[in-house]
Image (cartoon, rainbow, N blue to C red):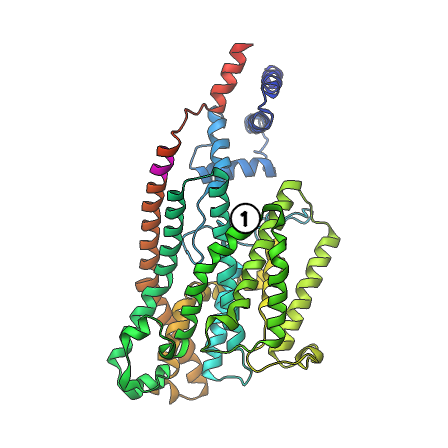
Amino acid sequence: MERCRHQDLRVAYDILSIAGGHSETYSLVNTTTSRLHASRASFAPGVSKPTSPAHAHTVADAEYAGDDASPKDDSQLIRRRASDSEIEPPTEDSSDSPRTSSSVNKKSDVQKPAPPSAGSKILFLDGLRGLAAMMVVVQHVGYIGIPIGQPAVDTFFVLSAFLLTMIFEKKARTLLNEKVSYKRWGWALLDYFARRFLRVYPLFAIVATYLLVYSPPQKEKLFFVHHPENYNLWKVLTFKFEYRYHVFWTLPLEIAYYFLIPVFVMMVLLLKKFWIVPMLPLGYLVAYSGFYWSRGDHMPLKPHLPTFICGSMAAIVYVKADQWNTKRQFVFRWYHWLVLRVVEMSSLAILFSVLFGGLVFSWVFENPIPQTSGGHFVSANVSLIIVCEMLLPGVVSSLLEWCLLWYAGKISFSMYLLHSFVIYSDWVRRQGYYNKFFAVWGLTFLLSMVSYHLVEYPSQWVAGRLGQWIKKKDAIERERVAPALPVMSRRSRLSCSLKST
């Protein structure tokens, strides 16, 4: 009986291969054959159900699709699996998207891990963001005399540019391939800017407004407000340069770069195979600014622009490398692993050397090339580490996936804006060393958690609902421009092909 079924499947495979459906037919026949083996083993007396990777993969796909994995409808399962790559990518900080861990599904003999896609939550990037937020708190508390606050802010800038560029590149590439109308481009840009506005602005506006209830001395103590008696809420909310108090100065820089990301992505996509051409002068700008430009807090966008550009370049390099690996079925060998780890560990060593005053290489800190005043330029090192871990996850991503760090990354924006209310309060300052340590971190985490669930999460929910509304409008426009044609399922095509023979 089984031999007859195999022969029928082979005949169907030959017929549809001639008709031009080779790849789809192979997927259908291969899935059906694997299910036949699984069902045969499950009915064999005294033999347990096989747990081969292929079988486990099929069951996982069925659970993800919400189906019952019945062999009666293999086409539905394959269709759901094929649509996984079409899932709308979440925003940079969306907490509802599936999380991807580099330590999951590792095999000792598999040399090509599945790199995380733009549509999945990458845990180690959350952990890196949480570490950067905690570094800012440490800098402002004054636990150590090493200036680690500026590199932490640069890490924020690199992460924002990297994630947003990667997400917008995927969306823009899809729209370009579909050759959509200008109206659909407008819906896509509206979705992008609305999500960014709702992610950043509501909590900032609440904090800026809340400062009104404080007396002038308290304003000056908590947020270093110069001339606190002249505190102007409207000028603070509109990011007037003289009114970017304390940690507020980074927000207008990020918001301004949000408008440059679509321009950068479209330039890369329109150049197609020559995408590397603009990377050369931009790379020179990043290197030159790292040696000769002065960067510090409370400065305009220009001196910090190379930091954002470095993150966007890293995103494009990763996307292109991932596409090349997928297209050619590239397999990482041990020497590829060695090269990536050497590059990553060298970048990490130089980063530590810069941060801690020549801890690893004194010549990096005491660079013979003239170094202007301001913070050290660490964005190139951070970008290289991110790209290496995205291509081939290693020990760095495993450490950053620690639950405390990635949860700190989840509430990092609240931690960044609100920690001053804790660390500069009179009650905390009067505490002894150990009590002060636990009070600072306990109250900062507690306040950030409350802020996240009361302000940030509802704002993200509104952004998600708005995105769904925009998606419906986009679908209506797509149907109006190009009416959908009737789609025949794979099982129907298989039946028609068999009948025609």
| Residue 427 in view in this figure | no
444 versus 144 height, above or below: above
Disc count in the image?
1
* Residue type at tag 1: Leu
Q: Which residues are magenta?
A: 475-479
- x and y percent of residue 146 in the render? 56, 83
406 versus 351 height, above or below: above
Q: Residues within 10 Å of mark 1 (few under 14, many from 20)?
A: some
Query: Dot 1 lies on which element?
Result: helix
Q: Residue furthest right?
A: 335
12 versus 48 height, above or below: above
**Is 263 part of what is drawn in magenta?**
no
- State the predominant SS element of the stretch in magenta: helix
The image quadrant of residue 237 is bottom left
The image quadrant of residue 440 is bottom left
- x and y percent of residue 162 in the render? 52, 59
- x and y percent of residue 501 in the render? 56, 9
| Residue 235 in view in this figure | yes
Question: Residue, x 42% and y 72% (percent of image)?
Answer: 416
In the rendered image, which residue does mark 1 sit on? 269
Q: Report the quarter where the N terminus lies.
A: top right
Pick whichever, 288 or 67, lies toward us: 288
- x and y percent of residue 427 in the render? 34, 86
Asked whether, in this view, residue 487 is left or right of residue 33, the answer is left
Asked whether, in this view, residue 352 is left or right of residue 403, the answer is right
The image quadrant of residue 277 is bottom right
116 versus 455 height, above or below: above
Q: Residue furthest left?
A: 213
Question: Residue, x 67% and y 66% (percent of image)?
Answer: 345
